[in-house]
Structures are given as structure tokens and as C-alpha cells.
């Protein structure tokens, strides 16, 4: 059977139209033909015109193409009723070209045909086409009906076409529908979706009569415009005015409850839904489940989920995403397994939620399995799924795989794609690639949003270049994002990490609203700059307001106390966490306490603290202990800490190096040799020291002892002269940790550390008075710290060094850390 038909009086209107099928719901071709044959048989024995009946029974475009020849054969094609039905069905199945080929040749078109075509254009075409046909209706003297306007208004709202929506609103009034309740609900919906919620409310208030649809429309408008409190107040108002909420109201208002985080109100609505008998509706149960998840009551959400008999894919997705949002990715993947075992067909949203769970767990293998599953189900071509894959591979430290997916998107790249890739590079310390990609995005006229800015700022912070920070700050102002709380918080954090803590504080003070993460960023900024007193004062200022500290806040405060030697104050803060704020200390908090005690030399107290921990000590804790033993040259406790670290993380060579340095400081050279042999046998490597310095928009990298820089010869010659100058000023090289080489070689090894090379390069290539900014990936060694103080003295330069833990501001022969780091 052909896909088209030949009109008995017209040229073939369907001859050039290929056969189409409803791939999402139609059965196989054989089954479809069998079903159609049964219908023909039944209808031919009951009705005079079986083709007319089949039009009523048609369920897909494919069946319609099979029925059309029967319509012609039975001589029904010229009947108005049959033509109207054909137009209606082609519109229904989205084939507007075929609908037009039926519509246009009809001589005496009735108004119903026009209304059907307009409905089809609003649902299956663009706004220009729909409005063009509406104008034609006026030209053909077709009297408009209320549904013409509601369909057009809905399309204007969906496309956020405010100007045209206003024009349709005006036409609606001049056509006499200004007081029609159904029409005005459409007007309210249009203004709401065009982000003109005040205009929507004005239209709502002018309605003389309101039904449940009107109320649901305005409530949904406020909820969609992030005005949850007003939406909730309207639910109360509708009941005062005698209108009872229905299931649609419940589904509409629950996201607003989730936005304000009002679990108490959510439970109240849940109770109402149960009393009204709505809880048995799967869409209501799913909305309740989602609300409980967003209100951090995931156990209640799970009870609702387990009680739903007929779960839809939306229900499963809500539960998976709920567990991800509540930091339980393991359970999210368990729900996915349950979903697959029950034979449920997963959607792109399912894959996206599960990929987020894999990313949070760092589970690369499971992430790859989901990638393969998405390919099998042909979901991997969905750009949202591909964006999730970029994020998953980035968080699993497979940044090159992520970049391959990004590049394969080609012209399909969305702003989310660019953001995911920029953030991926930043998270994987590929700072240059992150910045280059940001610049490429900008050059392609893809304008950044707040998420882009928040993603790229940490990359700039890693470089610690104030000039770059000022450039991105200017861009946020020009893009009108300088009032966004998250962008401003990222700016505060970035300035602090670029060494400009005063600029960070100025921005902080300018902010009208501050989130807890804003306070955390500023407190941490003070801490990393060794300004412990300022950090504590800011923390106390925070307590006077309405923002409650969280676990990260206390981590920042404890770190600030540690870097400034405020041991007793730090101990008090740690005790108050659980006692006054009911915050259970995490492994990082315990690690900070060990660092606090160990850094000031209270090593045995730190070790006792570890033994009394209520949880099993981890790498963070023993790492802090080993570092403290290195500072204070305690061999016994250093060995004990190292022994546990070797078991917890046997592949990390840095702990062996620290132990070897402890032995070297005690002149235990045989044990130094033994540690080095173990490292050689196990193939363990020390992380090479690397220092970065930026000059004229180019970042220069230096590794300890490296000679591959174009100015290496000049740098080493300058360092020889500089070393003589600082020696004359009182510098004495600390060569005790180096063994089995001559003294002059020892000094050469020390002077070729990465930060010395970077400082020399900076001094050679900048003018007098210019501040040198250095970024180092490891802790500054004691000798380099001492040498840099003398360099700042003899050169008259300020040198700012950011190592892996904190900032050091060297000026006039002193350091901001007061030699306590």
C-alpha cells in the first residue's frame, strides 16, 4: 500500500510525501497492518462507509496513510466532514504540509477547518507561520473563536515572545473575549512565561470570575518565576475565596515548597493531598517525593517511592536525582539497577542523574558502562547526556576523554557544554586549557553566564595573577553579573587566592546579601594569608547575623588558627562545633586539629588526639602528623605516622620523601638510603616541585633543576650573583638535608629549586618596584623561605609566594607568616 493517494479531481497532493511512522509508540509494520485489517473487517460489516469509521479509529500517521486511499475509493474525499477529519488528523500527527494539501483545494472552507489548521500550526510550526495563518483567517472573514487566541498565547509564552503576546492580547480584547475566563487564563499564562509576573497578576485580579484553572495558572506563574512564597500565599488565598485546590494545584505548588525548603508546609500539603484522595495519583506522589528530596528528607521520599504501585519513568528519575542531591550516590545507582531489573525503559534524564552519581563517586568503570548503555539506547546523541558525560569524565580525572566528547559535539555545543568543559579543565589543574577555552568561547560570540564565571574564576585563582582577576571582574560588571551572589562569592575567593586579600574584603563589604559560602571564602582568605585574628573577628561578625556556620566554616576557622598559631582558640572552636552547632566533625576537621597541635610542636598531644578519635583516622590525619614531625624533626612519631600512611596510600611517593627528610635532618643517612631503595623498588616518584610566574599574559613554568627555559643560562648566572649578595646580607644556606656531595654542589642544588628560578626570572624581566607573584605546587622549603626573605631585602622588591597551603608575603627581609608555617 502506498504512502500517498491521488485526488479524483486534483493533482496528487501526497505523491511527493514519503511514508512516515510514529517510531515512539507504533507497533511493527506487520502488527499495524493486521490491526488495520481487523478494523476494516469489523467496520465493513457494521457501517455503510468503513473508511469514514477508520478515520475515527486512526491512531498514527502511518495508519492514516493507509486509510486515505480507502477514503478516495469510497467517494468520501469531497465530503466536508471527511475533509475536516483528514485536516484534523494530519495536524494531530504533526504533518502540516499534508494538512495544507488537503485544506487548500477545498472551495467552500468552513470556519472549523481554519480553526483546526491554526491549532495545528501553533502546535507544530513556528510563531511566524501561525500568526501569518491567523492574519489570513481575518482576511478570509473567518470569525475567531476563543481557542484561536489561547493557542497563540500559549505559543507566545513558550517562545517568550512578549511583544507579539501583547498584540494577541489586544486582538483578544477587540474580539470581545476580554472577560472570558478561559481566554484570560491564557493571557495570565503568557505574561508569566514571558517573565512579566506583575502584568500576569494584574490580569488575574481583573478577572470577574476565576475557576481552578485560573488559580493554578497564576500559582504556576509565581512558582516558575522563583517567587515561591507568593505562590504559597496564593494557595491560601484561593481557599479563603472558596476554591479548593485540585491535584494540579498540588503538583504546581510543591516545587515552590521545595524552593523555600519548608518541610513543615510540605507535610501540610501532603496531608491535604491524602485527605482529598490525590495521593493515589502517580503525578502527585512523584511531586511529593521530589519535594521531600529537595527538603533533605530523602527517607520519607523513599517511603513514598516504595508505596507507588505504578511508577513512571519520571518517578524513578526523581528518586535517582533525589539521592544524588542528598549526597547518596550509591543509593542512586542502586535505584538505577532496580529500575533496569524491572525492565523499565530509561530516559536521557535517567542517564544524566546516574552519570552525576558516578561523577560524585569517582566511579569511572560504572560511568563507562552507562556511556555504553546510552549508546545502545541511542541516547548519547542527546546534547544534555553528552554534557553529563563531559562532567563525569572530568570528575573521574579522565579529562582527555571529556575533551574528545566536547570536540565531537561540533555545532551542537551549548553554553552548558562550554561550561562543563571549562570547569573540567579547572578541576583537573589544566588551568591554561580552561582559560584558552573560555577565550575561544567568547570569540565565538557565546556569551558567558553566571555558571561560566564561577567555573573560570578558580582557574584564574590557580594562577594567582591579580591582573587576570581584575580583567574577569570587569567582564562580570559589563555582563551585569556583579550582583549575583555566587559570582560575587567567586570573585571574593579569586582575589584572596591571587594575593589581593584587601580587594577581596572590599568586595565582601559591598555585597548586600551574603551566603554562608561567601563568609567561608573570606574567612578562608584571611586564614591562608596568615591573618588568623581577622578570620576569627569575621567569624564572630557572622555569628551576629542570621547566617549559620556550617562544617566548611569551622574548617576555614581551624585552618586560620593553625596558620597563625592560635592553638587554644582553635581547640575552643573545635569543641563548640558539636556542642553549640550540632556539627559532627569530619575527617578534614580532625586533620586540621592534628595540624593545629603539631604545627606548634605539641606532637605528643596531637598523637594522643589521633588515638582517641571516634572514627578511623585517614590519610588527612596522618599526613598532617607526618608534616608536623618533619617541621619539628621528630623521628619516632614520624615513623609511626609514615607506617600508617604507607598502608593507606602505598602509591604516594611524597610520604616516603617526607620520612627521608626527617631522617636526613637527624643525620640518619642509612635510613635515608633505605627509604630511597624502597621507593626505587616500588617505582614511587616524588611530585616534582613546580613554580609558575606570569609575564605579559604568558605563564612561565619552572621545575627544580630545569634548564629548558629559553632564558635558563641568564637565570642561573643571575642566581649566582644574587646568592652572593644575600650571603653578604647574612643568608646562610641550610644544607643539612643533603648528603654525599660537596658543599658547593649542595648550595647549587638549593639555589636551583623551582621557586628560586621563578623569582630570578621575575626579577630579570620586570622593572624596579614591581611585585613578583609566584605559585608553587608544594610547600616552600625552609631554605628557600629564608633565602626569599633576604632576596626581598637586597632587591627592594615585594615577593608573594603561594604554596600548597598558604601565602607568604616577603618584604624588606621579613615574611607575613612570621616564620610560622
Image (spheres, rainbow, N blue to C red):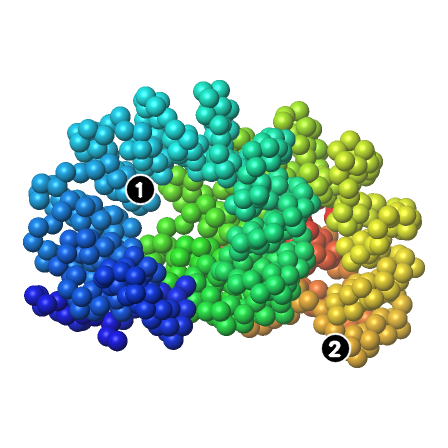
- Give residue 39's quadrant in the image: bottom left
SS at mark 1 in the image: helix
Is residue 451 in view from this perspective? yes
Q: Which residue is drawn at the image coordinates 43% and 33% (left, top)?
A: 216
Residue 683 numbered mark, or none: 2
Q: Which residue is drawn at the image coordinates 74% and 73% (left, top)?
A: 684
Residue 591 vs residue 109, the one in the foreground: 109
Quick check: 327 above or below 216?
below
Number of numbered labels in the structure image: 2
Q: Which residue is drawn at the image coordinates 12% and 67% (left, top)?
A: 7
Nearest to N terminus: mark 2 or mark 1: 1
x and y percent of residue 401 in the render?
52, 70
Determine crowd level at label 1: few under 14, some 14-19, many 20+ residues with C-alpha closer than 10 A: many
x and y percent of residue 73 in the render?
17, 69
SS at mark 2 in the image: loop
Q: Which residue is drawn at the image coordinates 24% and 75% (left, top)?
A: 2
- Give residue 496's quadrant in the image: top right
* Left or right of 398 in this view: 90: left
Residue 475 numbered mark, or none: none
x and y percent of residue 35 in the render?
37, 69
Residue 577 vs residue 508, the one in the foreground: 577
x and y percent of residue 187 in the render?
30, 33
Calculate the distance from the C-alpha at mark 2 to the C-alpha at mark 1. 66 Å
Q: Which residue is disc 1 drawn over?
A: 154
* Left or right of 746 in this view: 134: left
Q: Which of labels 2 and 1 is toward the front?
A: 1
Amino acid at each position: 500500500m502506498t504512502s500517498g493517494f491521488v485526488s479524483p479531481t486534483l493533482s496528487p497532493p501526497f505523491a511527493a510525501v514519503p511514508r512516515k511512522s510514529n517510531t515512539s509508540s507504533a507497533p511493527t509494520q506487520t502488527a499495524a497492518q493486521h490491526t488495520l485489517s481487523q478494523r476494516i473487517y469489523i467496520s465493513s460489516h457494521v457501517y455503510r462507509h468503513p473508511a469514514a469509521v477508520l478515520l475515527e479509529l486512526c491512531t498514527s500517521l502511518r495508519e492514516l496513510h493507509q486509510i486515505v486511499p480507502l477514503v478516495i475509493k469510497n467517494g468520501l474525499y469531497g465530503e466536508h466532514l471527511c475533509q475536516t477529519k483528514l485536516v484534523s488528523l494530519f495536524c494531530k500527527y504533526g504533518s502540516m504540509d499534508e494538512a495544507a494539501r488537503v485544506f487548500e483545494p477545498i472551495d467552500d472552507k468552513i470556519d472549523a477547518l481554519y480553526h483546526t489548521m491554526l491549532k495545528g500550526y501553533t502546535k507544530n510550526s513556528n510563531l511566524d507561520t501561525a500568526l501569518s495563518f491567523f492574519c489570513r483567517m481575518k482576511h478570509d472573514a473567518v470569525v475567531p473563536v476563543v481557542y484561536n487566541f489561547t493557542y497563540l498565547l500559549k505559543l507566545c509564552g513558550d517562545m517568550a515572545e512578549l511583544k507579539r503576546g501583547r498584540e494577541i492580547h489586544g486582538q483578544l480584547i477587540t474580539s470581545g473575549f476580554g472577560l472570558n475566563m478561559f481566554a484570560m487564563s491564557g493571557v495570565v499564562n503568557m505574561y508569566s512565561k514571558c517573565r512579566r509576573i506583575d502584568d500576569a497578576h494584574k490580569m488575574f485580579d481583573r478577572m470577574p470570575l476565576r475557576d481552578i484553572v485560573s488559580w493554578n495558572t497564576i500559582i504556576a506563574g509565581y512558582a516558575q518565576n522563583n517567587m515561591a512564597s507568593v505562590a504559597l500565599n496564593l494557595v491560601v488565598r484561593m481557599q479563603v475565596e472558596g476554591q479548593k485546590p485540585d491535584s494540579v494545584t498540588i503538583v504546581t505548588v510543591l516545587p515552590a515548597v521545595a524552593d523555600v525548603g519548608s518541610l513543615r508546609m510540605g507535610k501540610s500539603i501532603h496531608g491535604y493531598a491524602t485527605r482529598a484522595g490525590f495521593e493515589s495519583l502517580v503525578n502527585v506522589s512523584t511531586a511529593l517525593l521530589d519535594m521531600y528530596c529537595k527538603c533533605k528528607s530523602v527517607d520519607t521520599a523513599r517511603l513514598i517511592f516504595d508505596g507507588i504501585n505504578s511508577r513512571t519513568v519520571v518517578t524513578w528519575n526523581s528518586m535517582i536525582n533525589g539521592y544524588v542531591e542528598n549526597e547518596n550516590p550509591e543509593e542512586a545507582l542502586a535505584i538505577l539497577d532496580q529500575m533496569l531489573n524491572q525492565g523499565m525503559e530509561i530516559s536521557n534524564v535517567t542517564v544524566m542523574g546516574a552519570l552525576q552519581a558516578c561523577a560524585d563517586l569517582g566511579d569511572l568503570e560504572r560511568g563507562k558502562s552507562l556511556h555504553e548503555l546510552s549508546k545502545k539506547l541511542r541516547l548519547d546523541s542527546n546534547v544534555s547526556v553528552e554534557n553529563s558525560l563531559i562532567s563525569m569524565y572530568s570528575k573521574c580525572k579522565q579529562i582527555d576523554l571529556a575533551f574528545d566528547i566536547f570536540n565531537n559535539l561540533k555545532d551542537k555545543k551549548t553554553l552548558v557544554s562550554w561550561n562543563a568543559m571549562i570547569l573540567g579543565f579547572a578541576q583537573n589543574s589544566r588551568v591554561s586549557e580552561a582559560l584558552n577555552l573560555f577565550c575561544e568561547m567568547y570569540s565565538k560570540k557565546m556569551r558567558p553566564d553566571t555558571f561560566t564565571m564561577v567555573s573560570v574564576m578558580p582557574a584564574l585563582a590557580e594562577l594567582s595573577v591579580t591582573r587576570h582577576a581584575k580583567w574577569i571582574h570587569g567582564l562580570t560588571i559589563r555582563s551585569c553579573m556583579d550582583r549575583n551572589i555566587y559570582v560575587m562569592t567567586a570573585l571574593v575567593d579569586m582575589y584572596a587566592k591571587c594575593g589581593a586579600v584587601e580587594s577581596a574584603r572590599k568586595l565582601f563589604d559591598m555585597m548586600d546579601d551574603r551566603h554562608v559560602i561567601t563568609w567561608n571564602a573570606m574567612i578562608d582568605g584571611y586564614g591562608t594569608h596568615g591573618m588568623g585574628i581577622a578570620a576569627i573577628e569575621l567569624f564572630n561578625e557572622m555569628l551576629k547575623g542570621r547566617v549559620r556556620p556550617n562544617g566548611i566554616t569551622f574548617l576555614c576557622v581551624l585552618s586560620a588558627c593553625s596558620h597563625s598559631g592560635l592553638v587554644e582558640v582553635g581547640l575552643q572552636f573545635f569543641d563548640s562545633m558539636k556542642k553549640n552547632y550540632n556539627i559532627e566533625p569530619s575527617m578534614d576537621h580532625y586533620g586540621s586539629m592534628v595540624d593545629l597541635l603539631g604545627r606548634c610542636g605539641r606532637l605528643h598531644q596531637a598523637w594522643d588526639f589521633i588515638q582517641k578519635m571516634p572514627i578511623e583516622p585517614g590519610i588527612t590525619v596522618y599526613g598532617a602528623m607526618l608534616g608536623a614531625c618533619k617541621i619539628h624533626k621528630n623521628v619516632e612519631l614520624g615513623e609511626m605516622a609514615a607506617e600508617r600512611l604507607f598502608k593507606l596510600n602505598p602509591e604516594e611517593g611524597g610520604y616516603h620523601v617526607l620520612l627521608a627528610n626527617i631522617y636526613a635532618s637527624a643525620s640518619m643517612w642509612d635510613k635515608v638510603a633505605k627509604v630511597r631503595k624502597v621507593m626505587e623498588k616500588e617505582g614511587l616518584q616524588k611530585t616534582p616541585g613546580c613554580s609558575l610566574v606570569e609575564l605579559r599574559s604568558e605563564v612561565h613554568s619552572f621545575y627544580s633543576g630545569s634548564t629548558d627555559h629559553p632564558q635558563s643560562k641568564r637565570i642561573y648566572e643571575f642566581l649566582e650573583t644574587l646568592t652572593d649578595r644575600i650571603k653578604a646580607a647574612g643568608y646562610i644556606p641550610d644544607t643539612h638535608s643533603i648528603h654525599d656531595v660537596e658543599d658547593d654542589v649542595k648550595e647549587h642544588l638549593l639555589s636551583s629549586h623551582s621557586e628560586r628560578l621563578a623569582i630570578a626570572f621575575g626579577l630579570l624581566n620586570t622593572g624596579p618596584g614591581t611585585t613578583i607573584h609566584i605559585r608553587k605546587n608544594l610547600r616552600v622549603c625552609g631554605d628557600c623561605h629564608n633565602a626569599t626573605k633576604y632576596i626581598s631585602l637586597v632587591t627592594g622588591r615585594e615577593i608573594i609566594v603561594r604554596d600548597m597551603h598558604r601565602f607568604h608575603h616577603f618584604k624588606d627581609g621579613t615574611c607575613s607568616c612570621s616564620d610560622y608555617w
